[in-house]
Amino acid sequence: MKRAKRLAQVADYPFARWAERVDAARQQGLDVIRLDIGNPDLPPPDAVIDALCQAANEPSHHGYAGYRGLPALREAVASYYERRFGVTLDPTCQVVPLLGSKEGIINLSLACLDPEDLVLVPDPGYAPYAAGAVLAGATVYQMPLLAERGFLPDLRAIPDTVARRAVMMWLNYPNNPTAGTVGLEFLAEAVAFARRHGILLCHDAPYCDLAYNGYSPPSILQVPGAVETVVEFNSLSKTFSMAGWRAGMAVGHSGALKLLAQVKSNIDSGMFLPLQNAATVALATPPTWIAHRNQIYKQRLDVVLSGLERLGLEVPAVRASPYVWTRVPDSLTSETFARRLLEKSGVALAPGSFFGPGGEGYVRISLTAPTERVQTAISRLASWPAWAGAS
Ligand code: MLT
């Protein structure tokens, strides 16, 4: 059987490979605590589950749902953006519902890129940004995210020749995997850069409602005029603990969204109607539900931060996201470190290399397990000698 050449450059999704290691560790009898993938363990709001069940009981809800998403869902996305960010969207042309933001990221890449094109991606960064570019045959230019720059790319360091060839640029704040955050000032600089060079600026914001100590992450669409050059991706996965439901949205530049919808109409056949009803209900969840949920993440964050501090490890401040990004001993690659930790202690963390070459030397700890399991994981880490540089 022939394998397409493009697949030679896109390995299996890192967390798909890692899940096999986790399964193998479990088969060895280890009690594995998964702090690797950002898979929320807490349930969605009750009203969302009720809406799904009710809608699923309606016999007429099991056929094709149409390609553009129900007007009610698109309006719910627009209302959420208005309420949450003060951003006004036209639900008829500035909102596209997605089967999770990951498919939208890949499909927008297929919609906008040709083989000679260049895409600017953060390094480290969420793997689908680069994978989408490579699947479209385009070339990736990595923008380093360094701790000393607060995990913001240095746009002035991008050579003019690169900026001229670039067709898309990806940003993601609150950031996965570093937990870096951004202010509107930098986002405005990025919008100006994109405009100057005719680049479609894609901002991925699935962690915008997972924040601590009163911090409220911005939408890039709050930058005046951003909608003329920006598509923002968002998701119900983390905000409403609905990762398995596969519900997200792309909002912003109507021309780019039209191309995205064109690709999608050829690839998927729309979102299951009861899911659209439930997503519509989710988007109207009161902020008090989110605040309460974030308090639970904050307890876990404090457990992890104080544990790492006791181990003498430095961790950049975490204002948002369910992630803690910390260094591994110099003597081991991040994957070797995480593999040994998994096999010896049953604690699964995400190797930094899953997020690109810039992630080497780090691991990512996800707060998406019950607080007492996070506590147990930290105790196991503390008694594992490799944190002190031994193998
Ligand atoms: C992550 O852990 O980085 C994400 O949850 C993975 C994903 O969205 O596929």
Image (spheres, grey):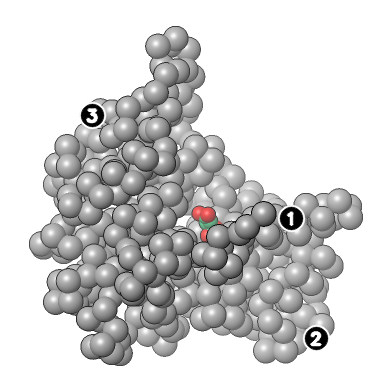
- Residue drawn where x is 61% and y is 59% of the image: 3
Residue 390 numbered tag: 2
Circle 3 packing at 10 Å, graded few (<14), some (14-19), many (20+), is few
Pointer 3 residue: 71
- Residue drawn where x is 63% and y is 57% of the image: 2
Considering every residue shown, the one lying at the far front of the view is: 1
Pointer 1 residue: 20
Q: What is the CA distance from the residue labelled 3 to the residue labelled 1?
A: 40 Å
Q: Is mark 3 within 8 Å of ligand 1?
A: no
Q: In this view, does 207 lie above or below 75?
A: below
Residue 285 x %, y %: 35, 35
Q: Which of 371 and 28 is in front in this view?
A: 28
For marks 3 and 2 on the same chain, the one whose residue lies earlier in the sequence: 3
Could you tell whether 39 is left or right of 264 in the image? right
Q: Which of 187 and 95 is in front in this view?
A: 95
Where disc 3 sits, the SS reads helix
Q: Which amino acid does label 3 sit on?
A: Pro
* Quarter of the figure that contains the N terminus: bottom right
- Residue drawn where x is 22% and y is 70% of the image: 199
Q: Nearer the viewer, residue 118 or 245?
A: 118
Q: Which amino acid does label 2 sit on?
A: Ala
> Contact (CB < 8 A) between labels 3 and 1?
no
